[in-house]
Image (cartoon, grey):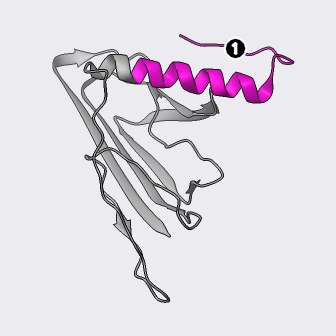
Amino acid sequence: MITIKIRHTTTYRFHKPVSLWPHRLMLRPRESRDLRLISSSVMVTPAAVVTWAHDVFGNAVATATFQTMSTHVVIDSAAGEETFKLDPGALVAYPATSLHSVAEVTRGVRLAAVGWARSFIRDAARRELLFDLDSARKFFEEVGSQGIYEVDF
């Protein structure tokens, strides 16, 4: 099993107190058959009402609604352990910036091949957009067009 612990902190600072509009937070990985989120937490300063929903792609989206003016905002997110077990011969790929750990081999032998891939799309924003479009295409292939879906931009 592979275990990944994710911690992310975002801090905004302002020169004077400002009114804060609702913030949409996409901080949790999308769960799947191979990836199960065991725990997660979001701490927001100043205090905010945090509500959760899922978008049309299955992403967990939090909305932080602030009640007071502030000179700063801190969003601290921790996703507990995400653990999954791959079938023999399967591949796991993740960004080089991702921290991970691999469980100790208690029986048998682990054979591993390590490699690097370079994208043909140099611009990171374009790569992300293409990924999002492909994810949406796959989602709608799976669910078909039976339902009506609200898209929030």
**Residue placed at 37% from the left, 47% from the top?**
94
Q: Considering depth in this image, is 74 or 17 the residue closer to the camera?
A: 74
Tag 1 residue: 150
Q: On the rendered structure, is 94 left or right of 153?
A: left
In the image, what residue type sits under mark 1?
Answer: Glu
Report the magenta residues as a range.
128-153
**Percent of width and height locating residue 5:** 38, 59
Q: Considering depth in this image, is 84 or 68 the residue closer to the camera?
A: 84
**Percent of width and height locating residue 28:** 49, 42
Count of marks, rendered view: 1
Q: Is residue 23 above or below residue 109?
A: above
The dominant secondary structure in magenta is: helix
Residue 72 falls within the magenta-colored stretch: no
**Residue placed at 40% from the left, 81% from the top?**
104
Q: Considering depth in this image, is 144 or 41 the residue closer to the camera?
A: 144
- Extreme residue toward the top, this view: 153
Residue 108 in view, yes or no? yes
Q: In this view, does 108 lie above or below 118?
A: below
**Percent of width and height locating residue 61:** 54, 31
**Residue placed at 80% from the left, 22% from the top?**
144
- Extreme residue toward the right, this view: 146
SS under mark 1:
loop
Q: In this view, does 117 lie above or below 145?
A: below
- Extreme residue toward the bottom, this view: 107
Q: Considering depth in this image, is 106 or 150 the residue closer to the camera?
A: 106
**Percent of width and height locating residue 118:** 27, 35
